[in-house]
Image (spheres, grey):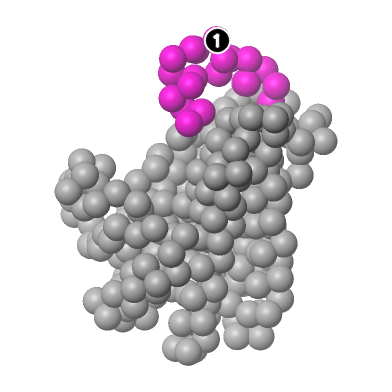
Amino acid sequence: MNLNSPVFFKQVVLVSGALGDIGMAIAQRFVGEGAIVALCDRHPKDIAMDKLSVLDNLGAVYHYDEVDVTDFDQVKTWIDNVYDRFGEFHIVVANAATVTLKGYQELLPEDWSKEIRVNLDGSFFVANYAANCFVKNATKGNIVFMGSWAAHAVHQNLPAYSVSKAAIRMLCQSMALEYATYGIRVNELAPGFVNAGLSKIVWSKNPAEIEQARQQVPLGDIIEADEVADQLLWICNPKNKHLTGSTILIDGGLSLVRK
């Protein structure tokens, strides 16, 4: 399968949590395929412009909205705005997430609630409203949840994150079953250690920690954000027409040694 072929030319792709390292890598990768990208994040556009300038430099056709994914009305307005501007959309990436580094004894109720609201509720709002739009418009679309290998391996200091990502896995499978009859594919991409987001910040301050993380990975390397984007495009490739309800685990073998 040739990922360099322009299989996504003129397709409209929605990405939530788009200003993070992985979200921007996904957006740039789709733009490179000739896609139109509709992005949202929690930052106002004037603050977002610095990161969005990367897309301007690529000559991308894109749309950005400030959206709190925990608010269904904001999600609905964003998706409706995208449809009004570009018409039919084809791919939806539920990527927005947050993480709190605390154990259960330190985790506050508001910490728990925030992660469940953003990671699980927000993903559901984005994916399910988009799926209903697919059904209404008879679009055989693609939905991809950004999961994590933390969904099936116990992680200290990541309780709410791990639980929310485990729930994402069942959300993916149950939505895939219901929407399969409409030709809509729903899948999950679950990376291991990625040099992005909070991990990237921590590792940049202490290079010894990234080396320790690398040594835990059987294949001996850390995933970069653009590699996550490559795998996501592979999932969405129309040649994978039988792939739905699946979790694509890219963790370098971490799940084989940590259960």
Q: Which sits in the foreground, 152 or 102?
A: 102
Q: Position of residue 70 (x, y in %)?
A: 47, 60
Above or below 186: residue 53: above
Residue at position x 62%, y 35% from top? 107
Q: Is 168 displayed left or right of 119 in the figure?
A: right
Q: Which residue is depicted at the point 21% across and 44% down?
A: 47
Which residues are drawn in magenta?
198-217
Residue 176 visible to the viewer: yes
Where residue 224 sits: x, y (%)? Answer: 49, 34
Residue, far front? 109
| Main secondary-structure element of the magenta-colored stretch | helix
Q: At x 76% / y 36%, what residue is drawn?
A: 154
| Direction from residue 15 to residue 102 in the image, left or right | right
Is 212 part of what is drawn in magenta? yes
At label 1, the amino acid type is Ala
Q: Who is closer to the viewer here, 182 or 136?
A: 136
Residue 28 visible: no
Number of marks in the rendered image? 1
Task: Name the residue tied to disc 1.
Answer: 208
Above/below status of 177 relative to 144: below
Question: Within 10 angstroms of label 1, few (less than 14), some, or many (20 or more) residues?
Answer: few
Q: Position of residue 235 (x, y in %)?
A: 57, 59
Give the quadrant of the N terminus.
bottom right
Q: Residue at x 50, y 44 (%)?
A: 98
Instruction: Indicate the quadrant where residue 191 lies.
Output: top right
- Look at the numbered disc 1 and give the secondary structure of its residue: helix
